[in-house]
Image (cartoon, grey):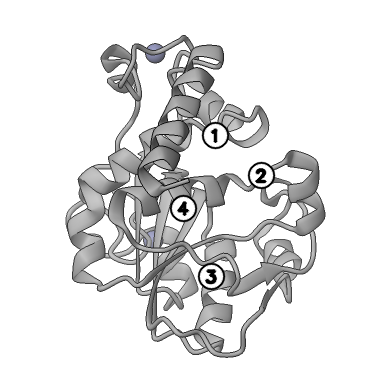
Amino acid sequence: MNQVVCFRLYRGFLRVFDWIFPPRCPVCDCILDSGELIHEKCRRKLLFVKEPCCARCGRPVDSDGKEYCYDCSKQGLRSFVQGKCMFIYKGVIKETMYRFKYSNKREYGSFFASEAAKNYSEWIEQKEIQAIVPVPMYRKKKRIRGYNQAEVFAKALSAQTGIPVETNIVKRVRDTKPLKLLNPEERKNNLKNAFQGINNIVKCDYILLVDDIYTTGSTAEAVSQELLKMGAKEVYLLCICIGEGT
Ligand SMILES: [Zn+2]
Ligand SMILES: [Zn+2]
């Protein structure tokens, strides 16, 4: 079978799939019109991250004079160079993220990726990113859930930017407790040795690490440290949501 026939069959399959399982709006979860990624009225309900933001992690700060957010100034230098986040984890997006994570709403990844490309493709280009790495999920957990939402986002972003996704660089070797149940000290210990490099030498110098929700940054920090240990020169971070912080 030649490539053109394969491509047409694939497109036909997608159309049938969309007809049986039509894509739904990430905010209200109602069926979308063809080609839509979100209802315009629903998009307006989302809280987009706006400047001024922390120069390190991208969390909004309350005044222009503040260079770093409370967490970043308290923890000192992060191992990732800079982070960007798209939405404040507050209001309607909390339910969106819950469905994206636990209810198999992988289609939301296309909306997140399209927003990321719209706002950050120039930044990604400037940083000469060579690979997108999703924060890995523990294997057993992924088997139970069926997918890793950070990987879904990474793949959708790759389709928008043309930058490949690498899932074979670092893995999560320990399951970790939900961060919201732990205090800062317990969080640090919880993540100790949780990630491990798979390949000894990372062939990409500039990596974009992606995740769904950024809270204190300790997960991103742990994965980023592992990537640097394995030979990456610089790690950048892009998260769908960020908590307001302390
Ligand atoms: Zn909607
Ligand atoms: Zn920060």
> Going from the N terminus, do you reach mark 3 or mark 4 first?
4
Q: Is mark 4 on a helix, strand or loop?
A: helix
| For marks 1 and 3 on the same chain, the one whose residue lies earlier in the sequence | 1
Amino acid carrying mark 3 in the image:
Glu
Q: Residue at x 53, y 57 (%)?
A: 216
Q: Residue furthest front?
A: 1
Name the amino acid, label 2.
Tyr
Which residue carries the number 4 mark? Answer: 154
As measured in the structure, the alpha-carbon distance from the residue carrying label 1 to the one carrying label 4 is: 11 Å
Which element type, helix, strand or loop, lies under badge 2? loop
- Answer yes or no: do the residues labelled 1 and 3 have beta carbons within 8 Å? no
Of the two numbered discs 1 and 4 on the same chain, state the one appearing first in sequence.
1
Find out whether the residues at labels 1 and 2 contact each other: C-beta distance under 8 Å: yes
Amino acid beneath label 4: Ala
Q: Residue at x 49, y 72 (%)?
A: 75
Residue 100 at what x, y percent from top left? 56, 33
> Mark 2, mark 3: which one is toward the viewer?
2
Residue visible at 31% across and 58% down in the picture: 162
Report, in whole angstroms, how far the alpha carbon at label 3 lies from the one at label 4: 18 Å
User: Ligand 1 sits in which quadrant?
Assistant: top left
Quick check: 199 left or right of 129? right
The image shows residue 146 at horizontal and vertical percentages of 72, 41
Q: How far apart are marks 4 and 2 (CA)?
A: 12 Å
Q: Position of residue 225 (x, y in %)?
A: 54, 79
- Circle 3 residue: 221
- The residue singled out by tag 1 in the image is 106
Q: In the displayed structure, does residue 29 sit left or right of residue 222?
A: left
* Mark 1 and mark 2: Cα distance apart in space: 9 Å
